[in-house]
Image (cartoon, rainbow, N blue to C red):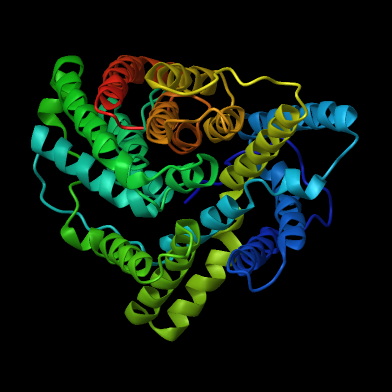
Amino acid sequence: MSASSTTTATALPAGWPAPVVSGVLLLITWALTLADSLHWLETTTLATVLAWIYVVLELPRLSPKQRKPIVALIAGGIVFTGLSSYTTGQLDLIALASEHLKLIMLLASVNFIRMATRLYGGSSSKGLPSFLATFTGMHLFSSVANFSSLMLVGDQVRRPRTEGQPDISPLSYVILTRAFALAIFWSPFLSMIPLLLHHVPGVEMSKVYPWSMAIVVFALVFTVLESRFRHHQELQQYNGYPMRPASLKLPAVMIVALLATHQLLPQLPMLVVVSIIAVLVPTLWMLLTHSPQQSVDKLKNHVKVVLPGARPEISLFLAAGFLAAAVKSSISAGLIPSPFEHTDALAATITMVAVFVIASLGIHQFALVAIFAGLLAQATTTPSLMALAYIVGVSLAMSGSVFSAVNFILHGQYQVRSRDVFRLNLPYSIAVLIFSTILLFVMEANGVQ
């Protein structure tokens, strides 16, 4: 799901715990948080402490570019915590530090998908058919495989290294970023849908999906037309990585398992169901398709390498949750007023643009969703409109912000340059923002709240 940093700014002290210690800590954190979510045990405090120990152990292993936004989020959280505690005289560190603990459970669980994930190349077509097949395959595959899809597919479309040039072409970069970022519009295995269910009161995703899928279709059509005009020569000869249906067997099984479980046990929160299936199905799949010794080796490697390698996303989410909780405590203390008395299409549009712009300046997009949702908790009278606005803002920030985890990974793995992030995505971002704005007002006109 994640890429570990390729460079570190700080030499680790002698005797610093090995990555496997962090892997074990994250695994225990997942189990404790799941037990707490199922009301089997009260383990929030212990799970929170272990999660933050994981961050402390892994922070030095991050690259400077990965570390800076995490430190900034924590620093911002400390400032707002100080302001609210000074005003109210109250301080609950566990409540502040555990804001995104269940999302950490989700992030840890979806890493297990990598154990059973395998790609199978399809036809060797070229041009537009290859581009469309690669885009579609990446979109469906990433909806379950999460961040690991960026590297699994990225390695297949990597081009020979040229001095001063990224290891992937502009069209391959467009596929990786946009196909992945568009999957958050509908996939419960990515973090966006659980985040909305956690933060937006009264949201029903069944009312949001028809509109969100309209944006996905528009974004795909725009991407094809844009590629024909901006990258015509490359598109003519493009040789991507069309996937065989076998590559999508595991995603299909997981989605069916999720829908069936949700239908049979509707009382279980979606985030809990996803966290269970993301571990259970890949583990069973691996046991059925590998020998016992291979399965044991894969499990050991998962704890030693993969779970510690989730350090960028785990650290970002915990820090973002801390900042969001601190801001919400300042709101409760009366230090920050709500910007709207109620929400409508205009408020949703302003929020959508604000999330995208501020995230592009370096604030983590999920922290922004939590912050805005906290600011508007009492004012949110149109949860469907606000949910769609958050999704669009986050999706565009994922693909178009140099500070997003997506572009962190592509920069570290394939040397994608910051200027190319803006150059390749700005027209797309503007077009999707305009279309989404129109759609929000259409939703309002049709009585969707």
Give the quarter of the figure containing the C terminus: top left
On screen, residue 391 above or below 112: above
- Which residue is more in the foreground, 252 or 434? 434
Residue 97 coordinates in the image, percent (x, y)? 73, 46
Whether residue 195 sits left or right of residue 432 in the image: it is right
Answer yes or no: is residue 265 visible: yes
Residue 210 coordinates in the image, percent (x, y)? 24, 39
Residue 255 coordinates in the image, percent (x, y)? 31, 61
What is the residue that sits farthest to the bottom in this orientation?
A: 292
Point 83% across, 57% down: residue: 15
Residue 71 coordinates in the image, percent (x, y)? 72, 32
On screen, residue 385 above or below 276: above
Point 71% across, 28% down: residue: 331
Answer yes or no: is residue 127 visible: no
Occupied quadrant, residue 318? top right
Occupied quadrant, residue 329? top right
Point 87% across, 32% down: residue: 88
Whether residue 228 sits left or right of residue 281 in the image: it is left
Whether residue 33 sits left or right of residue 386 in the image: it is right
On screen, residue 319 above or below 282: above
